[in-house]
Image (tube, grey):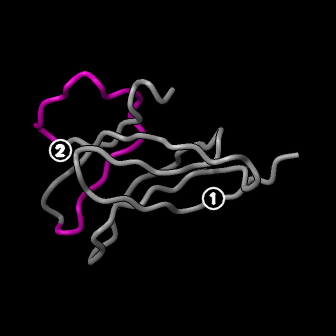
Amino acid sequence: MAYMTVYRYQFALEDRASVFLPKGAEILMVGMKKGEEYVSLWARVDSFAEKHEVRLAIRGTGHPLDGTEGEHVGSFICSDDYCVFHVFREKDER
């Protein structure tokens, strides 16, 4: 039986990022708290499932997409309230 809970994971605000999530994790939200340098991702996970790397593509509003972007998992306003970014699970991560 799975033990499900919500955990927060963090990654740098760059064009690409990786997080290690338990297999079967459901990404619920992404965001950036005021004053923090890192982007946070909240996911519903099975705490006992094996972890694997999930690759993310992060794009700013108006920035070009390069075709590697897959499923959109969330958008957020950066901590300075100036830019909006969009987070995608890369295509080969489905």
Residue at disc 1, secondary structure: strand
Q: Are marks 1 and 2 in contact (CB under 8 Å)?
A: no
Residue 38 location in percent, x, y?
32, 66
Would you name the residue on which mark 2 appears?
60
Q: Horizontally, is 37 left or right of 83 in the view? A: right
Residue 67 left/right relative to 87: left
Q: Is residue 66 inside the magenta stretch?
A: yes
Three-letter amino acid code of the residue under disc 2: Gly
Q: Is residue 77 magenta?
A: yes
- Provide the major secondary structure of the magenta segment: loop
Neighbour class for label 2 at 10 Å: few (<14), some, many (≥20)?
Answer: some
Q: Residue at x 29, y 44 (%)?
A: 16
Picture coordinates of residue 54 (x, y %)?
Answer: 48, 41
> Residue visible at 36% across and 36% down?
88
Front residue (pair 48, 86): 48
Provide residue 25's location: percent of width, then percent of height: 61, 43
Packing grade of label 1 (10 A; few <14, some 14-19, many >=20) is: some
Q: Is residue 68 above or below residue 59?
A: above
Magenta segment:
60-80
Q: Amino acid at mark 1?
A: Val
Is 6 situated above or below 35? Answer: above
Mark 2 falls on what kind of element? strand
Decide: is 13 above or below 52. below
The outermost residue toward the bottom is 35
Instruction: Classify residue 86 by image quadrant.
Output: top left
Q: Residue at x 26, y 57 (%)?
A: 13
Q: On the image, numbered disc 1 is attached to which residue?
A: 6
Q: Is residue 12 left or right of residue 8?
A: left
- Residue at point 53%, 45% (across, down): 27
